[in-house]
Amino acid sequence: MTEKLFYRDPYLREAKARILRAEERDGNVRVLLDRTIFYPEGGGQPSDRGMIEGNGFRVIVDRVHGKDEIWHEGKLEGRPPREGDEVRLILDWEWRYENMRAHTGQHILSAVIKGLLDADTTGFQIFPEYNKIEIDYPGELSWELIDEIERKTNEIVWGDAEVEVEVYDELPEELSARLRKAISEKVRPPIRIVKVGTADVTPCGGTHVKSTREIGIVKVLNFYRKSRRLWRIEFAAGNRALKALNEILGDYWGALGEMPNKNRPLRKRVLELREGLERLEEEKSKLRHEVWRWKAEALLGNAREIEGVRVITLVEGSPMKDAQAFAIYLVENNPNTVVLLAGKNYVVFAKNEKLDVSMKELLREVLREVGGGGGGSDNLAKGGGFKVSPEEVLEVALEKLRNVLSSRG
Ligand SMILES: [Zn+2]
């Protein structure tokens, strides 16, 4: 059993303790202490970080867990710790204090949301850069609503309300009725009740600041619907709120600085860029059709005539997708025409739909000779993976097509 000093005084940054057990594995060590200031992970609050110093060794603590027996894990420096060693515990205070600010801020935020929307908080998690709650709310959240929630939350924060923790073996009826959140069946006495001024009464096992003023500010950063009734709200408190806002602002101004027109609002500038892109796409498409028209004209002028069918062959420099689009354009606009295109490791065979010859069959014949794979329909077939050059593939294709056309009768 480890004595939980963090409950007696959450502001304790250092303490002395004794090692009850120690286990070492691959340079990492886990240590069970008789007493600790390290909060173990639980209830949405992450575990504390810090150092355990003994005579001849040091543990850089990065994970703390357990209920009655609290284990401290981390990297070992120096000799292995032993049972009975006296140690000094040093908390990463900034980490813990920001967690306390965030945790207490969450109580108020959840209480305000319960009051305004009658929505229960069903989940809570502190992350290094922000926190997230999940609320059960079938309605719509908006920034207007969030604004109202934030104002009420910060009014309580700045009101300097006292945060009190009471411990009960059995809850008085009067107190049970005032709880924001019913006590889960899993909770065994002693039951810790956290009161935030007159704003919130709720069972909680975390660490909290003693006055709401210490939270500084609670700022919602984002919110979105997670499922039909569940909304996620991301928020930050204390110094982490400033850090998060600065990051977002840095991103905002940085993005605006990249714009041709650097005047706010960014959203308008983005829309302008998008419209510009759409115009360019349109222009590109027009130009492409213009090029196709010229290219088609030149190719048709040089086309072979086999058994009354116009046959165009070409070694293409463009990617297969573009070659295919051009082949389709060519046969759609020219009756009685077959197009055989070969590019870097691909072929595209296309024919006008009225023409009675199968491109799929032709491709199969060609692949039988040059290897590779592919397939398609009677009107359009594509293949690739052969070992010979595009010129050679075309030569084979032309010969096969000639055979097919002459055998048509
Ligand atoms: Zn709490």
Image: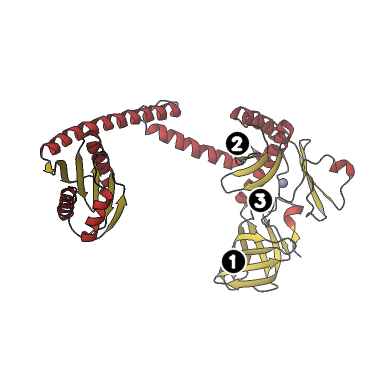
Residue 390 placed where, x, y %?
Answer: 18, 53
Residue 347 placed where, x, y %?
Answer: 23, 50
In front of the other: 343 or 130: 343
Q: Which amino acid, by three-letter code, is at mark 2?
A: Val
Q: Give the residue number, with chain letter if any, for mark 1.
A: 58
Q: Which amino acid, by three-letter code, is at mark 3?
A: Gln
Is residue 195 visible to the viewer in this orientation of the structure?
no
Distance (Cα) linking label 2 and label 3? 18 Å
Picture quadrant of residue 201 = top right
Q: Is residue 315 above or below residue 32?
A: above
Secondary structure beneath label 1 = strand
Q: Which amino acid, by three-letter code, is at mark 1?
A: Arg
**Does label 3 point to a residue whose CB lies under 8 Å from ligand 1?**
yes
Residue name at image x 74 percent, y 58 percent: 4
Tell me whether circle 1 and circle 3 mark residues in contact (CB < 8 Å): no
Q: Earlier in the sequence, mark 2 or mark 3?
A: 3
Q: Give the residue number, with chain letter if any, for mark 3.
A: 45
Disc 1 crowd rating (10 Å Cα; few below 14, some 14-19, many 20+) is: many
Secondary structure beneath label 3 = loop
Q: Earlier in the sequence, mark 2 or mark 1?
A: 1
Residue name at image x 15 percent, y 49 percent: 406
Disc 3 crowd rating (10 Å Cα; few below 14, some 14-19, many 20+) is: many
How was the colour assigned to the protein in this rendering?
secondary structure
